[in-house]
Amino acid sequence: MYSLNVAMKNVLLLLLAVLLMSTKESTRLEEAKHIAKAENKLILLRFTGSDWCGPCKKMDRRVFQSDSFNNFAATRLVLIEADFPKNKELDGNTRKENKDLARKYQKVEAYPYTVLLDADGKLLKTWRGYGGQYPTYYLEEMAPFFPDHERPVADAAIVTQPGGIVTDTANTTDMQATPVR
């Protein structure tokens, strides 16, 4: 009798865990929200096609791998990447989480698509595509969402052309996005 009660209790706990997991948001998002609240950070969610999207690859190299972005992100952001590759396999859980994140936050099916969220997962800002902007462009776009409104250092955004002409390369509005096919 005792072992039957223990077995039934274990089955009920297992069913409850499965039910909770099936209704819960992305595990990565929940973890990011927890970290963001604890460390007073925002969440930057990137939708990318890492192995097929040209603008995604450029944005990754030029922005997300840059020292200026990573220095800023280390103290201000929790990063999540939702990748939708065509030529490599993702494990089933990651693929499902990415689709769930896209359903909730990717309002336009284009890549790259970047989303800034508060610590509760509330949408603050979106960027569609990539037009060659330097990291400073994105850091300045995010600055108003931080309490101290600290303006990031314009590292590579200002370029002096021959003849002393100064060009702000970060103010590019030509965004390239790869549509979903």
Image (cartoon, rainbow, N blue to C red):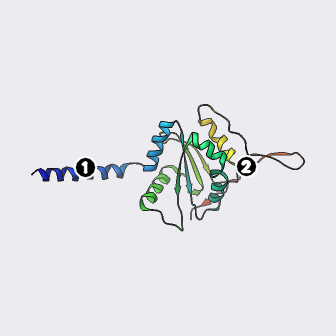
Please say if 136 is above or below 149: below
Tell me, yes or no, if residue 26 can be seen here.
no
Is 121 in front, or is 174?
121
In the structure shown, which secondary structural element does the residue marked by tag 2 occupy? Answer: loop
Q: Position of residue 8 (x, y in %)?
A: 18, 52
How far separated are the C-alphas under marks 1 and 2? 54 Å
How many discs mark residues in the rendered view?
2
Q: Residue furthest top?
A: 148
Q: Mark 2 or mark 1, which is nearer the start of the sequence?
A: 1
Quarter containing the C terminus = bottom right
Residue 88 disc label: none
Amino acid at dot 2: Thr
Judge from the rendering whether residue 69 lies leftward or rightward of residue 31; answer left or right.
right
In the structure shown, which secondary structural element does the residue marked by tag 1 occupy? Answer: helix
**Rendered image quadrant of residue 139:** top right
Question: Which residue is found at the position 45% from the left and 41% from the top?
Answer: 34
Q: Position of residue 90 (x, y in %)?
A: 47, 63
Q: Position of residue 172 (x, y in %)?
A: 73, 49
* Residue that label 2 marks: 172
Residue 13 disc label: 1
Question: Which residue is found at the position 52% from the left and 35% from the top?
Answer: 40
Tell me, yes or no, if residue 178 can be seen here.
yes
